[in-house]
């Protein structure tokens, strides 16, 4: 029987850690006119999906690094891949295994060994369904981007990393059930990794050492770590020599673009100043949180940063200012003077909370997790609400 015509040829991703199965299934489907892409485990499967965007996925369950259930969950949680038909193809044939597969979002469940005729029939039927990926609006793959909030300061020592940790926790608390990402884009200056107890994080380094074209969703997913709170993080090392990676501007913009595709909310620790890589990251930011301190010298640096932000085209309408007040009262500028100097309203004020900060560091948690009723938590959630308000036209 001649193979059916596929116009254009439809692409199927086959994922299995057994090489013989990959060859057998791939050959069977290739004879029917399909284009076959292969992956040997769950992590590679996500990379292949990001690279090739297949029309259908045949997915083994028991695999190294990431099983088929978790791959299915991640694909279903992403709007750009949520409607790709998934067939779980496995030797696990118990009813509870099938139920588990269907509950995470699989469309079909086939038990090995499956007769080639049945495999082909199931694949054809799924690809004919009107809800499959090829019937969706193509733009949804590229225009579904989450909110990206950058945090920056004009001078060091103002608590940018602490505020980034707490803000990510605020998004996680306010939008329960939504995925939140926290990324410190400061190679060689990793503070968040130390706070959370990660001794030698290499996630950011690994990505910055790649060619920009190699930084796709799968690569970024593989670089993330998941904190016990549920927040997923891209961490920077704290080795001084890694600061040289700050020049990897094209890689940085690719990283932030992929982060925006992975989750609805991403918080970026941008640190201090406007490195070339920071400027590229800012291109992807929905809003920018500017950290200020009521100290005259620090305010000079902050005003210069604001002026340069305007020069590179970052709209002041997308900037929110928060004050970290750790200056002696007699030396501090008034809020009115700060707002007049910057031309920005101070939207939140954070006062010292050394005991709460110590408890959070000891527990490798955010300050919100330690005390969700604290003044710090109240001001952080106020910022979350303000940042997520639509910007007036």
Image: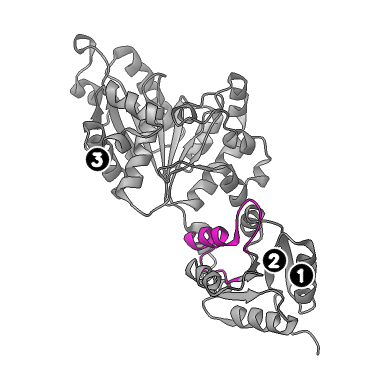
The numbered mark at residue 26 is 1
Q: Are marks 2 and 1 in contact (CB under 8 Å)?
A: yes
Tell me the residue at 43%/42% (across/down): 228
| Residue extent of the magenta highlight | 61-87
In the picture, residue 126 is in which quadrant? Answer: bottom right
Instruction: State the residue position of label 3.
Output: 382
Image height of 330 relative to 157, above or below = above
Query: Counting residues from the N terminus, which is met first, the one under dot 3 or under dot 1?
Result: 1
Give left or right: position of 188 versus 157: right
Give the structural element (helix, strand or loop) at label 3. Answer: helix
Tell me the residue at 35%/35% (across/down): 166
Q: Residues within 10 Å of mark 1 (few under 14, many from 20)?
A: many
Residue 343 in the magenta stretch? The answer is no
Image height of 6 relative to 242, above or below = below
Residue 246 percent location from the top left of the image = 58, 28
Of labels 3 and 2, the one closer to you: 2
Instruction: For marks 3 and 2, give the CA distance.
Output: 47 Å
């Amino acid at each position: 029987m001649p193979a059916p015509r596929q116009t254009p040829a439809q692409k199927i991703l086959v994922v299995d850690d057994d090489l013989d199965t990959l060859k057998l299934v791939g050959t069977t489907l290739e004879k029917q006119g399909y284009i076959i892409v292969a992956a040997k485990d769950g992590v590679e499967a996500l990379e292949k999906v990001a690279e090739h965007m297949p029309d259908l996925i045949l997915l083994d369950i028991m695999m190294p690094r990431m099983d088929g259930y978790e791959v299915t969950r991640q694909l279903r949680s992403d709007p750009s891949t949520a409607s790709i038909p998934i067939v779980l193809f496995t030797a696990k044939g118990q009813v509870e295994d099938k139920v588990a597969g269907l509950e995470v979002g699989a469309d079909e469940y086939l038990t090995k060994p499956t007769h080639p005729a049945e495999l082909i029939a199931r694949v054809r039927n799924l690809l004919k369904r009107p809800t499959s990926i090829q019937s969706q609006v193509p733009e949804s793959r590229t225009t579904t981007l989450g909110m990206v909030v950058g945090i920056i300061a004009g001078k060091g020592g103002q608590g940018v990393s602490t505020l980034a940790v707490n803000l990510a926790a605020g998004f996680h608390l306010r939008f329960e059930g939504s995925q939140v990402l926290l990324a410190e884009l400061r190679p060689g200056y990793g503070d968040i990794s130390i706070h959370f107890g990660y001794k030698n994080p290499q996630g950011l380094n690994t990505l910055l050492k790649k060619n920009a074209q190699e930084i796709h969703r799968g690569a970024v997913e593989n670089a993330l770590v998941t904190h016990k709170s549920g927040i997923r993080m891209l961490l920077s090392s704290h080795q001084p020599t890694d600061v040289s990676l700050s020049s990897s501007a094209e890689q940085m913009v690719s990283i932030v673009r992929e982060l925006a595709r992975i989750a609805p909310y991403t918080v970026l620790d941008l640190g201090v100043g406007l490195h070339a890589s920071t400027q590229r990251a800012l291109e992807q930011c929905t809003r920018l949180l500017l950290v200020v301190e009521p100290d005259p010298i620090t305010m000079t640096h902050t005003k210069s940063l604001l002026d340069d932000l305007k020069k590179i085209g970052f709209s002041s309408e997308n900037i929110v200012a928060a004050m970290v007040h750790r200056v002696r009262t007699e030396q501090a500028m008034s809020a009115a003077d700060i707002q007049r100097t910057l031309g920005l309203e101070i939207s939140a004020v954070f006062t010292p909370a050394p005991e709460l900060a110590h408890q959070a560091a000891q527990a490798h948690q955010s300050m919100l997790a330690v005390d969700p009723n604290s003044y710090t938590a109240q001001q952080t959630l106020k910022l979350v609400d303000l940042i997520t308000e639509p910007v007036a036209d």
